[in-house]
Amino acid sequence: MMRLLLVCLMLPLLLAGCGADNIYASDAEVAKYRYVSEEPPSLTLYTVISTNTGAGGHSALMINGRERIIFDPAGTWNHPWAPERNDVHFGITEKMRKFYVDYHARESWYVRAQTMPLTMAQADQLMARVERNGSVNKMMCADSVSSALRDMPWLHDKIPFTFSPIKLSKAFGELPGVVTKDHYDNDPDDNSGVLLIQQEPYRHGETAFNQ
């Protein structure tokens, strides 16, 4: 009942905002840039936090299992070498991971990365869940991330349903084995130029990328 009430309260805001993007990369693109990390399976919750007020601005998940992906609900980061399907970015090499963090960390925002170990089975289960989630409407990032996490039997009673990135981050940080790292940057708040810089090799016709 409480969830239904919150959704009803949010509905006018959602209708006033932008809809989901519904970007869907081809099988060939996803296969071409698929990246498998040598690190053990893990889950990272990214939270973008205001350096001025401490308010949360965005939530996303990086899942490292049989491949490494980022679930970036209603996010604005993109790169041609990290093809996207409905808010899931594939091909998350170490360079792409750093690009993602650098894009969000700037003068008035920092990025909190909270990482916990997973089993390969848990990584598979969560990856399948976010891949079938579909595109997310604006302002629904924490709701989508918390819902995906709560659908995991091993997290259901530990993660709240919430629209708040900060509340989600706090609950996630209380899970056993979580390691937290904050990323700061002095880049200006207008980060539109960051994407141009990150995509410069692609625009010059480069087909390979140093990870």
Image (spheres, helix red, strand yellow):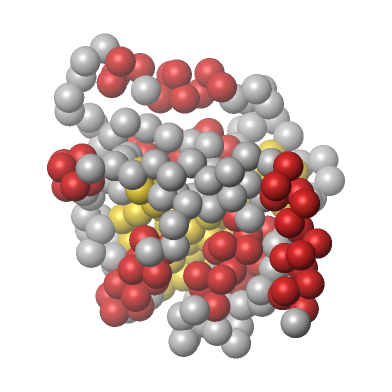
The residue nearer to you, when weighing 130 against 206, is 130
**153 relative position to 3: left or right:** left
12 sits left or right of 155 in the view = right
Between 29 and 203, which is closer to the camera in this rendering?
29
Who's the residue at 53% across and 46% down the image? 20
Relative to 161, say whether 166 is above or below: above
| Position in image of residue 210 (x %, y %) | 23, 31
Front position in the image: 25 or 55: 25
Observer able to see residue 112: no
User: How far across and down, in percent of the image, does residue 13 sit?
Assistant: 76, 49
Indicate the quadrant containing the C terminus: top left, top right, bottom left or bottom right.
Answer: top left
Q: Is residue 193 left or right of residue 130?
A: right
Vertical position of residue 122 compared to residue 102: above or below: below
Residue closest to the eye, 30 or 98: 30
In the rendered view of the protein, which quadrant contains the N terminus? bottom right
Residue shown at 84%/46% (left/top)?
53
